[in-house]
Amino acid sequence: MKEAHKPGVYDTLNPIGLIKTAIEADSKDYDESWNKRKATVRRNVISVYGVPPDEELNFSPSTSSNCVRWEGYQKLGYEGTPMSFGAKMATMIGRASHDELAKILRRNAPGRHNVPTNLDSEGVYGVMDWVFNNPILHKEEVIDWKFVASFKFKQINRDGLHELLRNTKNIYNPEPEYRRQLLLYMYDREKRGKEVACGVVVYVNRDNPEQMKPALIIWDAVAKYDAEQFLKEIQEAKLAVKEGQIPKENVISPYICRSMCPHVQHCEPGQAFAQRNIRRKRKVMPEWVYKKQREEFAQRQERLQELGIIPLPLPGFEDAVNADPKAREPFRRKK
């Protein structure tokens, strides 16, 4: 039997235990102070008006993009599984990197940073990392940073890339959760009267920060339709929460339930989905959405060809495409 390690003189010089204790205490203090502030605000309003304040039911774009049911558990006061020390460290490093990057870009690049997203009528509130006006297209790009581990970084690929981006290099397709998050941001910008070109998820390899992958979401008819459908799911979730009920789940990727959600112990659908025992049905999109997307694609392609960003088609190319019935609807999603 292996003898248990007995601390020696030099073991007492190891500061890791103190670092972990400090971080755990800080997280606990933050949660407690946040709850105290809420209680103080509530008490102050009651002392003046005799009734409690109206509770704003705002949903977060990032959490809702993972699953609105997750938001529901939080809003209804369910206690989740405490975050591990490793997860807390990763979150802390990610936040610090976001803040430092925003400072650098604010000094050396155009645009606005930490831009509020406030879809008032929809009750969705969050913060965009960076918004700037593309000097060639004269339209906005909405950019969000994601600091991820090497394993996840390697999984980001070009599968399902938008037709307009097929001939590009080093442009990737984002994960569906991050796509939904950026859809809300772009929808908000258009609602404010801005012309939007795209959203960009910039993945940074946390283990090798020199490695970055830009993943683009073109803002077109399909993207806008998906944003509106997602907002409907959020509204349904909010109604359920107001009635004291857990919303219907809308999670896309099993790893969200398996590795990320702190409420999976309460959630039967999440437990089944984590084991891949539930299959999501692909939603059918109306034909007019595809038609509008094709029209937008033709306009953008012509504009990019005028600018010399993409090459002109070969002679006879259009006739060949029109003669092929399978090529008439290049954007239709596979059933």
Image (spheres, rainbow, N blue to C red):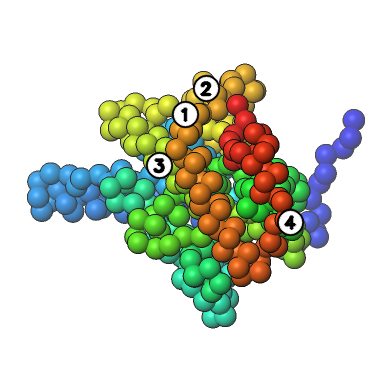
Farthest residue to the left: give it: 49
Q: Are marks 1 and 2 in contact (CB under 8 Å)?
A: yes
Q: Are marks 1 and 4 in contact (CB under 8 Å)?
A: no
Distance from the alpha carbon under mark 1 to that under mark 4:
47 Å
Sooner in the amino-acid sequence: mark 4 or mark 3: 3
Label 1 belongs to which residue? 249
Residue 67 location (% of width, % of height): 49, 36
Label 3 belongs to which residue? 228
Label 4 belongs to which residue? 314
Secondary structure of the residue carrying tag 1 is: loop
Q: Is residue 332 above or below residue 139?
A: above
Sooner in the amino-acid sequence: mark 1 or mark 4: 1
Q: Amino acid at mark 2?
A: Pro
Distance from the alpha carbon under mark 1 to that under mark 2:
8 Å
Callout 1 environment at 10 Å: few (<14), some (14 to 19), or many (20+)? some
Distance from the alpha carbon under mark 3 to that under mark 2:
24 Å
Callout 3 environment at 10 Å: few (<14), some (14 to 19), or many (20+)? some
